[in-house]
């Protein structure tokens, strides 16, 4: 496994694989790797001749300075896990390598970037588009892998790729990986106290219960069921729960309002912001 920290070295490392006829897969990450990331790496290795993983805590996507400061960083452990998984190239740039000057690009990401996370984390998706586009230009991957926990992020990245004419890059969405008790794996889970960690699986448990509830209730009632149940639980506070069309991310008012219906949630568990989602239907 080759570890590089400049774009020039990255391009050179990738070129050797491409010259040998290998397809290139990219897994962009912010480090603090867990089994969810490793499942993306495995999928990437199955589907490509070369797997590149980037580890970079991207400052432009944090609209909260404290969140950026507290974001977990475990570079040695990350490299150990990647080596074990069989990754070919790890890219670990410093901030000034990715942003030698301020990135003033403002993307026109459309409505998919304005709802939910877009409303609560202004500027977040523009920052994601900035860094992912830089990684796409540097690696020029055939396939790029993202986890479905960040359901909206995938739609935003597809929109960014279309806007920049990078639609030759196949964007692959991979299923959420969960702990045995249902909690979606996230680098942020490490920040939960033992008491909060015990409570956090209630998020997925409630989303699962809402599927049964939805069989005999309206969309609005189901939203209320989820929010009221979680808000009544110690440590938990729902920021939003929206039931949306899985393609457009626009709110759905009736269960038959779309053929792909997804519930997207953000919940604070203490001061740790957790996100998750559930599919109600997909025809
Ligand atoms: O999902 C993430 O970890 C980040 O948003 C990403 C895609 C690596 C961009 O910094």
Image (cartoon, rainbow, N blue to C red):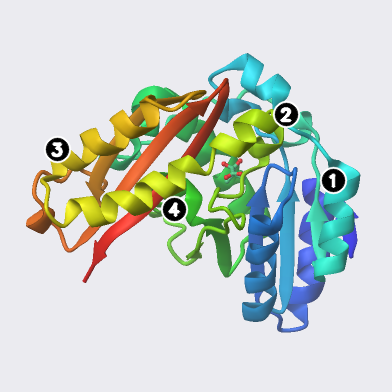
Answer whether labels 3 and 4 touch (C-beta < 8 Å).
no
The answer to whether one can see residue 192 in this image is: no
In this orientation, does residue 14 appear?
A: yes
Label 1 secondary element:
loop
- Say which label, 3 or 4, has the lower sequence index: 4
58 is higher (above) or lower (below) than 45: above
Q: Quadrant of residue 69?
A: top right
Between 62 and 219, the one nearer to me in the picture: 219
Q: Which residue does the image show at 56% across and 68% down from the upper left?
A: 143
Mark closest to the chain's N terminus, 3 or 2: 2
Circle nearer the viewer, 1 or 2: 1
Mark 1 or 2 closer to N-term? 1
Considering only vertical position in the picture, is 57 above or below 234? Answer: below
* Residue at 22%, 33% in the rendered image: 224
What label does residue 220 carry, if any?
A: 3
* Residue drawn 71% across the image and 36% down it: 190
Gap in angstroms between the C-alphas marked 3 and 2: 47 Å
* Mark 3 neighbour density, 10 Å: few (under 14) some (14–19) many (20 or more): some
Dot 4, how many residues are within 10 Å of its Cα: few (below 14), some (14-19), or many (20+)? many
Quadrant housing residue 179: bottom right
- The residue identified by callout 1 is 5
Q: Is mark 1 within 8 Å of ligand 1?
A: no
């Amino acid at each position: 496994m080759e570890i590089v920290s400049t774009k020039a070295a990255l391009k050179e490392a990738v070129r050797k694989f491409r010259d040998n006829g290998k397809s290139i897969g990219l897994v962009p990450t912010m480090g603090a790797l867990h089994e969810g990331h490793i499942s993306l790496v495995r999928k990437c290795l199955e589907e490509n001749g070369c797997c590149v993983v980037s580890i970079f805590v991207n400052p432009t996507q944090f609209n909260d300075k404290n969140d950026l400061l507290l974001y977990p960083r475990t570079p040695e452990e990350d490299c150990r896990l990647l080596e074990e998984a069989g990754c070919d190239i790890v890219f670990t740039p410093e901030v000034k390598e990715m942003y030698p000057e301020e990135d003033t690009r403002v993307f026109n990401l459309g409505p998919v970037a304005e709802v939910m996370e877009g409303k609560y984390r202004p500027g977040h998706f523009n920052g994601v588009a900035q860094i992912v586009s830089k990684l796409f230009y540097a690696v020029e991957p055939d396939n790029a892998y993202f986890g479905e926990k960040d359901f909206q992020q995938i739609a935003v990245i597809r929109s960014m790729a279309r806007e920049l004419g990078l639609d030759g890059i196949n964007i692959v969405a991979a299923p959420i990986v969960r702990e045995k008790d249902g909690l979606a794996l996230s680098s942020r889970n490490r920040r939960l106290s033992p008491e909060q960690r015990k409570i956090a699986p209630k998020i997925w448990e409630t989303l699962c219960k809402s599927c049964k509830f939805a069989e005999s209730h309206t969309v609005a009632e189901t939203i209320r069921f989820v929010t009221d149940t979680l808000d009544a639980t110690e440590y938990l506070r729902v920021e939003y729960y929206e039931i949306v069309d899985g393609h457009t991310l626009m709110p759905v008012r009736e269960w038959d309002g779309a053929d792909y219906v997804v519930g997207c949630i953000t919940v604070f568990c203490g001061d740790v912001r957790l996100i998750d989602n559930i599919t109600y239907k997909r025809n």
